[in-house]
Amino acid sequence: MKEPGLIQRTISVKKYSFMLQQLVNRDFKVRYRGSLLGMLWSMLNPLLNMLVLSIVFSQVFNAVGNYKMYLLSGLLIFGFFSEASNLAVTAVTANFGLLTKIYFPKFILPLSKVLSSSINFIFTFIAFLILGSFMNIHIWWGYIFIVYIFACLLMFTIGISFVLSALHVFMRDVQHIYSVIITVWMYSTPILYPIDIIPSEFQLLFKANPLYMYINFFREITLQQMIPDVKSFVLCFLVGFGSFVLGAVIFVKSQKRFIYYT
Amino acid sequence: MIGVDNVIMEFNLNRGKVRSIKEFLFAKVSDDIDKKQMFRALDNVNFQVQEGEIFGIVGNNGAGKSTLLKLLAGIMKPTQGSIKVNGTIAPMIELGTGFDFELSALENIYLSGSILGYGKKFLVEKVPEIFDFSELWDFKDVPVKYFSSGMVARLAFSVSTIVVPDILIVDEILSVGDMSFQKKSYKRMLELMQGGTTVVYVSHDVESLAEMCSRILWLEKGKIRKIGDAKQVCDEYIASLS
């Protein structure tokens, strides 16, 4: 059978957008089925998480102004990334039943996980805004750039998710390795602590962390009410776009062999 | 309509063996690890199916029937040779593609339908028809995990056969549900087949194959043993079994 060309691929994206929508829908229904608060958990979870962490750490880092919101903004961005990528790891392997029965574009599987986490992100973001309104955080016109930064973050996350879900097919260890990596990643990202406590010779290393770029960008807009500099705009885009392209290439190159590893 | 040209399909029998580092380091013979044990599931298979033809495939277990269907459906790609398919394919390689047992019957119709490639508008129109046919109106909002296996099969069959595609790939599915539903589904299959759809049909029920199909392909250990007139091939196949 011939490989589908670009035009056919675009058509298939349109054709399968309903499938994507249904998969995202399914994720939500299954996740909240039988729970009393349902979708509210998307808001409550990060808030409670923030509360616990802020009780513990606000004494240590009391120099940071508005520590609760500082923490919450970091958790918001990092939480999205870690949830989406963690779900995506098993996105392909958990659907082997489908892969062996019918043809469909396989990238839909990790993509659906990232999208359902995105919906979660929106709820968490609303919770952030509500809490912020009590904590001296005001919405201003600069908030439109949050859409920009989220688009970059989304590309970054999709790229990583593609790679993880493809790798997991060939090597099941990935799941376990990644859960360690994500923990290390969390603590090496200035979420709980300000970047100033890092010795200056290592600061560049910490600043090169893509997730810190996104978190910092988000914090500048929301907490400091300023527009980030042009360099941040460009870097955030390049990192996101690069990850997306690399992930897509790796996924497409390896997807033909998925079926032999079921 | 369907052209299968010198198709060879090989599997590595060691593919499922995931090697741990321990095994890798301490294997007594390193050949043990790298040796690929190739298994030829299909060997030089050639045939054509014309438009509107009902084409049967018979063969013992492990003859390569399911592999062939998977190749036709585009799920796998042949190791060598080529497969050409013109038209939309609705594979029914197994019923209930993409069912999530936590979801209700209605939700599953949308989920499974979308995976089969149908649009939203189309499915909304077809929902009453599906419930009519499967006789499951009373269980519309019940999670499928509470269904009996017969009920799941009825729902699955009804979803899989809502549309008349150009090419229908059928793998042994008529034995679902109770007697009355079996009759009903058999009738539905005949309807689909007589609607001018090209059908590729795999079954162990040789007698009904001989009745329905115009031509039959007999596979044996991945090779074509015989291909031709349905009645003739079936008789020879049955004779070879006794």
Image: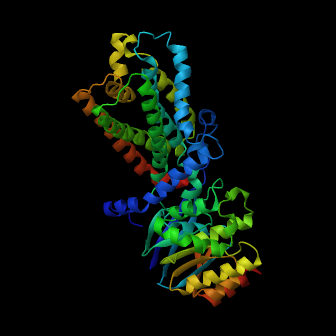
Against B17, is A50 above or below? Answer: above
Q: Is residue B25 left or right of residue A204?
A: right
Residue shown at the point (32%, 33%) measured from the top left: A143
Residue B51 visible here? yes
Q: B94 or A141: which is nearer to us?
A: A141
Q: B146 or B156: which is nearer to us?
A: B146
Residue shown at the point (65%, 53%) measured from the top left: B102
Residue shown at the point (55%, 26%) measured from the top left: A49
**Could you say where residue B177 lies in the image, as x and y percent from the top left?**
73, 72
Colour scheme of the picture? rainbow
Residue shown at the point (65%, 64%) measured from the top left: B140
**Could you say where residue A10 lies in the image, as x and y percent from the top left?**
34, 60
**Could you say where residue B116 lies in the image, as x and y percent from the top left?**
52, 65
Residue A177 visible here? no
Quarter location, residue A179: top right
Q: Is residue B121 left or right of residue B209?
A: left
For the N terminus of chain B, the quadrant is bottom left
Against B166, is B116 above or below? Answer: above
Q: Is residue B188 left or right of residue B74?
A: right
**Could you say where residue A213 lies in the image, as x and y percent from the top left?**
34, 27
Q: B13 or A248: which is nearer to us?
A: A248
